[in-house]
Image (cartoon, rainbow, N blue to C red):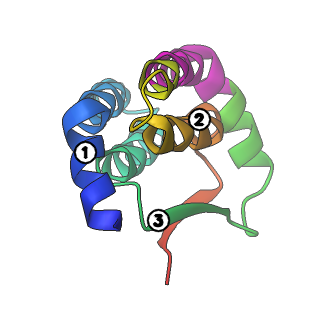
Amino acid sequence: MRTLLNIIWFVLCGFWMALGYLLAGVICCVLIVTIPFGLASFRIARYALWPFGRTVVERHDAGAASFLGNVIWFIFAGLWLAIGHVFTGVALCITIIGIPLGVANFKMIPVSLMPLGKEIVEIA
C-alpha cells in the first residue's frame, strides 16, 4: 500500500514539492553561509518525493543554534514552502482518493517550517 500511495503522491504533488525544496536548497548552498539550510532542504526534498513509510523525529542533540536557524529558515523559505503544502493538501482533499495524500501534505508542514533539529527515519 505504501508503494502505491508513494507512486500516486509522486505523480500528483511529490515531484513539484521536491522541486521547491531543491530550489531552496540550491539557493542556500550558493550563498555559502546558509549551507546547513541547503542540506536540510535536500533532506526534505527526498522526503517530499517518497513520504509514505517515513516519519520525522526530533533530534535530542539539537540546541540553540538549531532554534535560531529555524527562525531564519521560517522567514526566508519555510513559510512559502508551508503555504505550498497547504494549497496542495487542500486541493488533494477535495477528492476522496486524494484525502490520504492531503493529510500527508499537512503532516509535512511542521518540518517545512522548522527543518533543523529534525531527522527523517524509516518506519518499520
Q: CA gap, disc 2 to disc 3?
A: 15 Å
Earlier sequence position, callout 3 versus callout 1: 1
Give left or right: position of 97 versus 36.
Answer: left
| Image quadrant assignment for residue 12 | top left
Question: Which amino acid lies under the numbered mark 1 shown in the image of this protein?
Answer: Ile
Residue 85 located within the stretch drawn in magenta: yes
Label 2: how many residues lie within 10 Å, few (<14), some (14-19) or many (20+)?
Answer: some
Q: CA gap, disc 2 to disc 1?
A: 16 Å
Question: Which amino acid lies under the numbered mark 2 shown in the image of this protein?
Answer: Phe
Q: Which of 78 and 12 is in front in this view?
A: 12
Residue 18 located within the stretch drawn in magenta: no
SS of the residue under disc 3: strand
Q: Mark 2 points at which residue?
A: 106
The overriding secondary structure of the stretch rendered in magenta is helix
Q: Are the two marked residues, 2 and 3, in contact with CB atoms closer than 8 angstroms?
A: no
SS of the residue under disc 1: helix
SS of the residue under disc 2: helix
Question: Which amino acid lies under the numbered mark 3 shown in the image of this protein?
Answer: Arg
Q: Which of 2 and 47 is in front in this view?
A: 2
Res. 54 mark: 3
Q: Are the two marked residues, 3 and 1, in contact with CB atoms closer than 8 angstroms?
A: no
- Quadrant holding the N terminus: bottom left
Earlier sequence position, callout 2 versus callout 3: 3
Q: Name the residue under label 1.
A: 8
Vertical comparison of 107 with 28: above or below = below
Vertical comparison of 50 with 80: above or below = below
Which numbered mark, 2 or 1, is in the foreground of this view?
1
Q: Give the range drawn in magenta.
A: 72-88
Residue closest to the far bottom: 124
